[in-house]
Image (tube, helix red, strand yellow):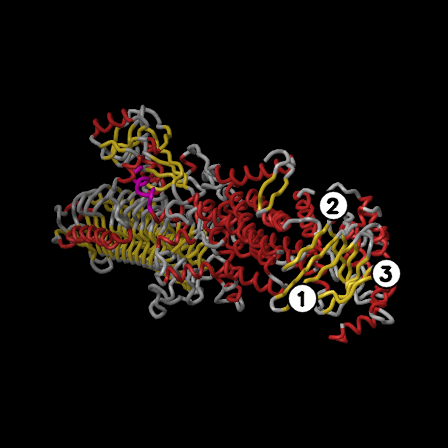
Amino acid sequence: MNQYGYVRVGGIRWQVKPNRRVTVAVAVCLVFVVGVFVVDPGTTPEPVSFEDTVQIGMSDAGMREAEFEGYEVPSAQVFYSQYSFVVGYTGLESFARNVGERRYERVWGVPTKAYVTDFSGTQPSPVGAGFVETSTDPEWTDASDARYVVGAGPVVAFSSEEDARLYADEYGGKVRGYTGVLETEFEEPDIEKAADEVIAGRSRTADEKVRKTHRLLSRNVSVVVGEEHETVQSAVDAAPPNSSVRVPEGVYREHVVVDKPVTLVGEGDARIVGYGNGTVVTVESDGVAVSSVSISGVGNATRGEPMRGGGWDETIQEAYGRSDAAVLFNETERALVHEVTVDTSTTGVLFSEVDDGVVAGTTVNGTEEWVNGFMGVLAIRSPVVVQNSTFNEGRDGVYSHASDGLVVRRNVMRDGRFGVHLMYTSETLIRRNEASGGAIAGIVIMTRPTSNYIVGNEVRDSRNGLSTVGSRSYFADNVLVNNTNGLRMGARASVFTRNVMLGNRYGASASTVLPSNEVTRNDFVRNEVQVTSAEGAMRVWGGNDDGNYWSNAPPGANVFRPTDRVDSSVTSTDGMVTFRRSTAYSLLHGLDTVVPGMRSGGVVDEDPLGKPAVYDRNTTEDTE
Amino acid sequence: MNKTESAAVLEANDVSKTYGELEVLKDVSMEAERGRVYALIGPNGSGKTTFLKILAGLLPPDSGEVLRRTGGAERAVGYLPQQPSFRDGFTVAETLRFYTRLLDEKMGDGYVSEALGDVGLSDASDRHVSGLSGGMTRLLGVAQSRVGNPPIMVVDEPTSGLDPEMTGRIFETLGGIADDGTAVFLTTHDLDRVARHADEVVLIHDRRIAGSGSPDEVVNEHEAESLASVFDSVVRGGGRG
Amino acid sequence: MSGAQGGRTVLRRELLTVLRTRAYLALGVGYAAVVVGAAWFSGGAKGGYLPTASSLTTPTEILVPVVAFALGYRVVLTDRSTGELDVLRTYGLGRAEYVLSLYAGRLVALSVVLVAPLLVVGGLVWTQSGPTITVIAWHGGVDSPLLLARFAVLTVAFGAAVLSVAVAVSAVSGTVRTALALAVLVWVALALGADLGVIAGVVTESLGDEAVVWLTSLSPNTAFRGLVLETVVGVASGGVRATSVPASVLSLVLWTVAPLVVAVRKVWK
């Protein structure tokens, strides 16, 4: 087209006199139109401070230990395309497992950038438990360019291939590239599928501990208190090892130290009453059982010097692990408290560094006001079994610190602060307990542990029913009734299934900012507010025909938004259904689950169940 | 008018037009000169409007041809449709300015006000077209059809529905335009006005031109008292013509 | 006389007509209210540009044809019924010149109506989205005003196609009633018919799976939806394609050009 040229449009010769302004405007528009599609909207983010990431992987206990010892935990930080926060992985195994996990991709999108800790030049050596000892702090390096050593302790990343090969040669691993490490199978069974097996395994281990300790009850009686020996202590002193000391009905005002493997067996109303200061029965030997007595007169002290100094948790041990108790087991094995009744203003039974400890059929009565009391059973680094026991009032029914493997089953906890309180404790089985009247919670998990199985418990009339954090845990078949908050879902990468939330003020709160849980087949029945959610991302539940039951969902709804004001009141507010069925509502929410990770809060159940998964009106009723 | 311009500005030769089965015009021929008003009369449905549109070049004839000798005129034919109406939301001046700019973007407001003055709409130039009376709308239409001084002007029923006073104004204006050297074609039913203002009458009936000439000639030829009686005898009389 | 001059004059008059018609102003304001409201009440604006664009996709798909039809379905028709078409022809205006100028004028107006609320929405996102929890590092995911800009461009392209259909409807219709009926028919066909047809074909297995991605380019609606999912929403996810981008772009171009050709041929003989 020359200055007075023409263009041919629609079969007609158009004389066009070029107009400079129009030409420039058209050119700018064209550049804009093409430009917005050519320019890549993504940016390359720089690594952030790891503390600022939303973390998943190693438990707090592990992280604290690493910090205390000065070890490094190989870590990754990942920027996902549809998730607004930076996800931090402690342990590259957990990183490798989760990147490309379809269930997460749906919510977080794809990783747009990942960094891993770079051990090149840090003289690393594996020291077990997922830790690496180094000479200097590792920096961050691009995960896709890094080399990974697999099979020599935890997976470790290097920016230099040379360093990776040296490390692999020295510690016996293989060097892999980025895709190689992502394709590596790191053993971690599907939580839900493996649940029955895990529960059975932990139950077996507990059964074994129970069997092992209950043998102590069949020892022959060698000494009877009151015959040759007036006090329990002198009877214990006189008894030969591996025999029983019988304590006949009566009140024994004394403190007892058991330093040999004997069994104390009460007969009738046998009461050991302490002086009101210090621990009443102190066990210093393996193979000791205390059975069928009642103990009172326990001291008031809840703090003391740690029994064994040095660890990352010294201050915790000091604060919790040195309280006065009715019975104290200190670094002993085969420890049993059986059918004992305790009245205490501090602790009932305290285990410190005990593996094979069992509390069975025991009742601990604490203080009326929990602030004045302490723990029913206090397990410090003690994976003990607590079963068939009752905890009335006091502070916590069972308090555990760093007691991986703890089993708490078939107990009743009433009117304390917490029923079960897990601190830095992973791999537990908390099963079929009944808690009620908890001032703060029925069952509470703190400090981000992993692999806890909380199954078949019932919590009523407490401020919080079941309060969870941590990861890769399993929360199933719990019944939470008439609590202020039924279920607090602070856990990540966990499974919540077949729980019943009934008549709570708030049925559940999706409180973690990292939506990574499987929430399926739970029954939300007549809670004042069925569910609340924290900011951070929209939670999309269901999606595999396995959503949850919502008593306020309209029958036949194929999507239910329990946090949405309109959807959640369709069955309770006259007229609301008309607006729920409006085109406007459909328009507003038509594509709102497309990028859930970039949205702000809210819960959407894509497969609400038409009838409750487990809730049965005849067997589970409101207490009101 | 000089001599060269007195040659036929428009020439229709054997024009025929059929709509489907209905033959509207058959081998119609006529010539027209500048400076004259041609009144096409005939009963409803006689093909007046069709013929008018063919003359204006808006409708192609099925056979025959229309020659327009308009030389280098910027606009060959001016056209005023029956019952014209204009885009809402514009003033009289804006409306006329739009048409002038179709021809020449640089044509100034001077032309617009002069043209409005010519049709007597100077006072209405800032009024919105939607507020104009039927007559004023028609006058604006006349002004429009004059834009670019086309040597041929085709005006369809310019006075239908107007009061006698306005009808008079329109005919006077059209006469004035013809005097400026334009061949003006119009259709109308107002035979009195035709008798007074038209230079030539073209009576269309039964697909052809049943009579033409100056009003007096036509009346005389039919030995009638007036155009109306000519019209009556031709149209009602059927076969007699 | 140059063609461009007549075209420019017609274009200018179309723009002025739209500007001076209160009903169009109301239409624009109403459309803006719906778009801004949808962005806000769907929760998109607090999330970012991408969630906003995805939330606006369905409302846009439904409303843009309504706006485009409202702006276009009578343009030629009105000029025809007043005799204006005949008048314009005596000014030497060509068919293409007239139709394209008319179209261009309405398109500029339509573009303003469609883009203006997205600018407001962009401002909303700019001020409202961001870290809701400040102790955690926030990067926002793959999100950028660029994505909303892409959405705006696609919206205008979609509007351009439907406006072209509307102009064709007005060019082929003899009466307002016909035009209105045709417009409604076309709107239903675009908004529902094409999708229903394809879905029915998929359900009855009379359409092969390999055909599906191409059928996304069938109607302007599916092409628009597919392009939004692919080039705006799709940047944050992997996996299958929502549409074939070249095919859908071509589809929008054809849906813009072909009705205009029809309109040009039908406006007058």
| Residue A480, visible in the rendered structure | no
Q: Amino acid at mark 1?
A: Val
First reached walking from the N terminus: tag 2 or tag 3: 2
Tell me where residue A53 appears, x and y as whole percent.
Answer: 41, 38
- Give me the chain letter of mark 2: B
- Give me the chain letter of mark 1: B
The chief SS type of the magenta part is helix
Tell me where residue A379 appears, x and y as whole percent.
Answer: 29, 46
First reached walking from the N terminus: tag 2 or tag 1: 1
Front residue of C15 and A543 = C15
Mark 2 surroundings: few (<14), some (14-19) or many (≥20) residues within 10 A = few
Mark 1 — residue?
A: B24
Mark 3 surroundings: few (<14), some (14-19) or many (≥20) residues within 10 A = some
Quarter of the picture containing the N terminus of chain A is: top right
Would residue B14 appear left or right of C165 to someone viewing this image?
Answer: right
Mark 2 — residue?
A: B71
Q: Secondary structure at mark 2?
A: loop
Among the 4 quarters of the image, the one containing residue A125: top left
Residue at the (25%, 41%) spot, across then down: A186
Q: Which residues are magenta?
A: A92-101
Q: Amino acid at mark 3?
A: His
Q: Is residue A335 above or below residue A73?
A: below
Tell me where residue A326 appears, x and y as whole percent.
Answer: 29, 49
- Give me the chain letter of mark 3: B
Residue B197, which numbered label?
A: 3
Asked if disc 2 and disc 1 are in contact, CB closer than 8 Å, the reply is no
